[in-house]
Image (cartoon, helix red, strand yellow):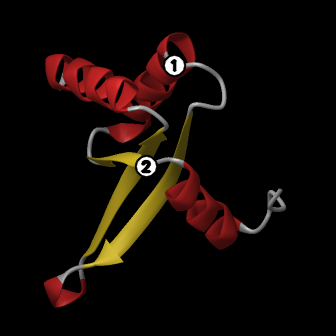
Amino acid sequence: MVPATDHTARKRAAEAEFPYHVDVPLLGGRGRLRNMLDWCEAHVAAGAWDMHRHSERRKGGRSLEYARFYFTTETDAEAFISRRRRVT
């Protein structure tokens, strides 16, 4: 198991362990993110999903921040996407 403080290693481990990824731009504030986390906790089995914050530099030096949700099954990822489309 990767130590909790090694964020880069934890992200790499999630990339390897969870084959289905859904990126969500962090534009709607923390309440929106909390709603997505609550949905995952209520609808996806423990250990079958994870989430990490990511950022990348865009042209002009602007930074794009997003949450990457990881799922073990395509069914869970699709349900998450479907639910997200209804809310946003």
**Which element is circle 2 on?**
loop
Residue ID for mark 1: 44
Which residue is drawn at the image coordinates 48% and 56% (left, top)? 53
Judge whether 34 appears above or below 30 on screen. Answer: above
Kind of residue indicated by mark 2:
Pro
Label 2 vs label 1: CA separation?
A: 15 Å
Q: Considering depth in this image, is 21 or 7 the residue closer to the camera?
A: 21
Q: Considering depth in this image, is 57 or 45 the residue closer to the camera?
A: 45
Q: Quadrant of the N terminus?
A: bottom right
Which residue is drawn at the image coordinates 24% and 29% (left, top)? 81
Judge whether 56 appears above or below 79 on screen. Answer: below
Residue ID for mark 2: 19
| Residue 28 lies in quadrant | top left
Kind of residue indicated by mark 1:
Val
Q: Considering depth in this image, is 6 or 34 the residue closer to the camera?
A: 6
**Which element is circle 1 on?**
loop
**Place of residue 7 in the rendered image (x, y in percent of width and height, measured from the top left):** 67, 66
Q: State left or right for residue 56 relative to residue 13.
A: left
Which residue is drawn at the image coordinates 24% and 78% (left, top)? 62
**Place of residue 64 in the rendered image (x, y in percent of width and height, measured from the top left):** 28, 66
